[in-house]
Structures are given as C-alpha cells and as structure tokens.
Amino acid sequence: MPAQPLEGITVVALEQAVAAPFATRQLADLGARVIKVERPGRGDFARDYDREVKGASAYFVWINRGKESVVLDVKDDTDRALLDAMLARADVFVHNLAPGAVDRLGLGARTLRPAHPRLITCALSGYGDSGPYREKKAYDLLIQCEAGLLSITGSPAAPARPGISIADIAGGMYAYTGILTALYERERTGAGTDLSVSLLDALGEWMGHPYFAQAYGGAGVVRSGARHPSISPYGAYRCGDGGQVFLSVQSDREWAALCERVLRRPELIGDPRFADNPLRRTHDEALTAELESCFAEHTAEGLIALLDGAGIANARLRDIAEFGAHPQFDARDRWGEFGSPVGPLRGLLPPVEVAGRRAPMRPVPGLGEHTEAVRAEFS
C-alpha cells in the first residue's frame, strides 16, 4: 500500500478533552505519528467522561485512535528532559494548555521558536491569549453561549444545545487545517511557524450568516426548531401515516417542481404568498398547512419516492442506531475495525478518501502504553 500523506511527520501533543485531540486524530488518520502526552494518574480526563464503549469512554475512543500514549510529569526534571528531546525531533507541537500555564512551563511559542526553527506549534484556547477573557475557563457549551449560537438554536420556547461538541470540533478543524497549511509552507521555506486557535474565534466564524443578518437586516435569526430560519419550505412535514419527511426547496425552479409534480397544485406557483423565497418564509405557517394537506394523502416512504422523482431534496429522520446501519455507508465500504484496550471496535473511516490508499485504522492507546518505548527511543 502506498505511504500515507503525512507518513514521517511526528506530532507531540500535550492535550486533553476534545478540541486538540480532535485535531491531532485527523493528522494521525493521514499517517502522522502522534505522541499524546498525558498526566500521571488518570491521564486525559476525557478517558473518564463515560463508560459507554465496553467500559471505555466514547469520547476518548472517538478522537484518540491512532496515537501513542506517554505519561509524563512535565514539572519533573527527568520527564521534562524527555519532553524536550521529543520536541527537538518533532515536526509539530500541539497543546491546549491555558495561556498562562504554557508560558510558566516554558513551552510557549516565543520560548520554543529560537531553539526549534523548523517546529510548527499550535496552541488551542477558549478565548485567545489576550483580552479580558484570557484566563476564563472555556468548555463547549459555554463557548456556544458566548458566540451567540445557543440564542438561535432550539425551539421558539427555549434554547437547546446541539447534540455534538460543535465549538470543540470547530476549533479542532481550524487547528488541523492550520497545521496542514504550515507544513506546506515549511516545505517551501524550511521554517516552522506558530499557530493559535481560540474556540470563540472558530465558532464565531461559523456564526457569520446570523451576524450579517442581524447587523444589516435588523430582524436577525430566531430559534426555529428543525425549520430553516431563512428558507421555506425547509424542515419536517407530517404525512398521512403519522411519519415525517424532511425536505428542502432551494430555488423557485424547485418550488415549481414541488407544486407540479408532488403537490399536484400548479396554481400555488403563482400564489402571491409564495412567489419567491422571502414571501414563502413570511407565510411559512400558511405554506406548511398547504403542504401537509397534500402530504396527508401519502405515507412517508411514498412521499420520499415522489420527492426523489421530482428532484426535491429530502431525508428521513434517522436515530443513532439507524445511522450505524445506514445503507450508504455499507454500500461504499465506509466502516473499518480498529483495536483498543477494550478489544476490537468498529468505526467510520476518515471522511477524506485519498485515491489508492485506505486510511490506517490504528488502535486507541491505553494510558501510558508507549511510555517505556518512547523513553528508550528519545533518551
């Protein structure tokens, strides 16, 4: 099998929780060697978030596949010497230590840069390394609150947390893409660079649409449950068998196809309430009544067949078990097996497919599993 894209790249990660480990797992999936430095005792506290995977943490299993685990006390002279030796030979150093803590440990970018000119450093934090929130503790839901995401997520009656750690994932993805860019730049210049990503900045970038709608449109975005705040029809609609179908109409051409080929109500195309998307959004309640009146004649599966035939985007609401058995994943051979301290596990292959190569599904490490081997290698 051909070499993976990042084979030969070594990443040292002083990380815990979600954002930084999510970034480094993407690097491991591309073939990088990721040495995860964990604290003595319990290690990364994400190991104890739950016991859902045969006694192991679902969070930890998800974002730490393919890494080596080394237990070090970075305040101990011997362990610190080992960490320094690892950094001297590393390509990338990733950490999510608090801004003040990393400087006190002598691991900040300004300290490392003179000694390691080719090293790429990446620091993840909640709010950045300056400003009044610099020292404030930051967890996923709290960043969602500060970024305004929670104010537009949920039903009109109450806000709701999205079902995944969206702020952590956003920060992790920007760290990952930043590191890839820095590696590319180093190939051209020979010099490393220092990156920093704050979760607030990362999620703030994703808040661009609601910000511009509020700043320049006045009304802003309101919580709309599973409906789209700006497009109609877009969301869940009841069918005659009690089921729901989610659909999305993105253009007037699609609206006409829906009216003619699914609703069998071509007169709705020219209805002044529904003539374009802003009008359809304004009259969403009336439009929903028209749609559900027509959909009452169909089962959910029958309606999906009609929508597919008319070229209207649609979906059924799947639960997590149904996601795990999705026919599209099976048809494309998207599941793989990897090892772990609790035995073999099944998981999805990484989203990016590299032609001619299958991503390595390397094991999830046990706490400190590689400590002695790494000591022998770097001592």
Image (tube, rainbow, N blue to C red):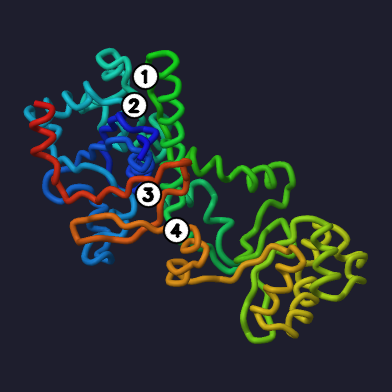
Quarter of the image with the C terminus is: top left
Amino acid carrying mark 2 in the image:
Thr
Hey, which quadrant is residue 153 in on the image?
Answer: bottom right
Question: Crowdedness of circle 3 by 10 Å Cα count: few (<14), some, many (20+)?
Answer: some
Q: Which mark is residue 333?
A: 4
Look at mark 2 in the image and give the residue it sits on.
121
* Callout in the foreground (3, 2): 2
Query: Does label 3 or label 4 sit earlier along the sequence?
Result: 3
Amino acid carrying mark 3 in the image:
Tyr
* Farthest front residue in view: 1
- Residue name at image x 45 percent, y 31 percent: 178
Question: Crowdedness of circle 4 by 10 Å Cα count: few (<14), some, many (20+)?
Answer: few
Q: Are marks 1 and 2 in contact (CB under 8 Å)?
A: yes
Hey, which quadrant is residue 324 in on the image?
Answer: bottom left
Task: Say which element carries label 4.
Answer: loop
- Residue name at image x 27 percent, y 37 percent: 34
Residue 137 rendering spot, x and y as whole percentages: 34, 44
Q: Are marks 3 and 2 in contact (CB under 8 Å)?
A: no
- Residue name at image x 80 percent, y 57 percent: 277
Residue 283 rendering spot, x and y as whole percentages: 80, 66
212 horizontally vs 140: left or right: right
Q: Which mark is residue 139?
A: 3
Q: Is residue 271 above or below residue 379?
A: below
Query: Does label 1 or label 2 sit earlier along the sequence?
Result: 2
Q: CA distance from mark 3 to mark 2?
A: 22 Å
Task: Say which element carries label 2.
Answer: strand
Q: Which mark is residue 34?
A: none
Look at mark 1 in the image and give the residue it sits on.
192
Q: CA distance from mark 1 to mark 2?
A: 8 Å
Task: Say which element carries label 1.
Answer: loop
